[in-house]
Image: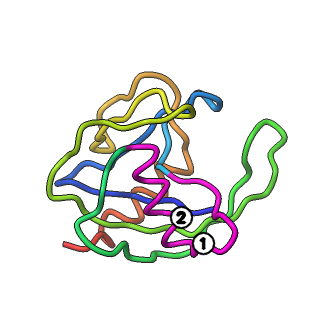
Amino acid sequence: MALTALWHGGAVVMVHDRFREQWELPGGLVEPGESPRRAAVRELAEESGQVPDGPLRFVGHAGFLLGPERRAEYGALFTGCASWRRAAGGDDEITAVRWWDLTASLPGRVSAIDVYLARLTRREAPR
């Protein structure tokens, strides 16, 4: 799995997952033959419509429990910046895209692990 915390100013892009019914960082599975970095860029574009200004920076690996069955997952975490916000993307899995400053309320549930990971990357994002 690969996740991206993409920053514009003081806001990170979040997507609302239709199936988990929560806000989270864009990300998903690494396809066969694909690097985690490439998967992060692809998932970011597919889910949010956003494109980073340059190469994403690898921050580290995160381990977490996913879904109602709480299966163990591991993901590569990347961060980057966008100098401008593109029109919101989305796909069959994503119902909404928002730029979030980590303090304002988002409508509905927010993934606690993704908030934690976003906070970790705030100071790591390339300037």
Going by the image, does 122 lie left or right of 75? Answer: left
The residue under label 2 is: 39
Q: Residue 43 placed where, x, y %? A: 49, 54
The residue under label 1 is: 34
Which quadrant of the figure has residue 105? top left
Color scheme of the displayed model? rainbow
Q: Residue 30 placed where, x, y %? A: 63, 64
Q: Which residue occupies the foreground of this view, 57 or 116?
A: 57
Residue at the far front in the pictured view: 33
What quarter of the picture does the N terminus occupy? Answer: bottom right
Contact (Cβ within 8 Å) of mark 2 with mark 1? yes
Q: Amino acid at mark 2?
A: Ala
Which quadrant of the figure has residue 55? bottom left
Sooner in the amino-acid sequence: mark 2 or mark 1: 1
Residue extent of the magenta highlight = 27-48
* Residue at the (74%, 51%) spot, across then down: 65
* Residue at the (42%, 64%) spot, across then down: 120
Which quadrant of the figure has residue 31? bottom right
Q: Amino acid at mark 1?
A: Glu
Circle 2: element type: helix
Circle 1: element type: loop
State the separation of the CA atoms marked 2 and 1: 6 Å
Residue at the far top in the pictured view: 107
* Residue at the (53%, 64%) spot, across then down: 39
Q: Which residue occupies the foreground of this view, 88 or 100?
A: 88
Q: Residue 23 placed where, x, y %? A: 49, 36
Q: Is residue 28 magenta?
A: yes
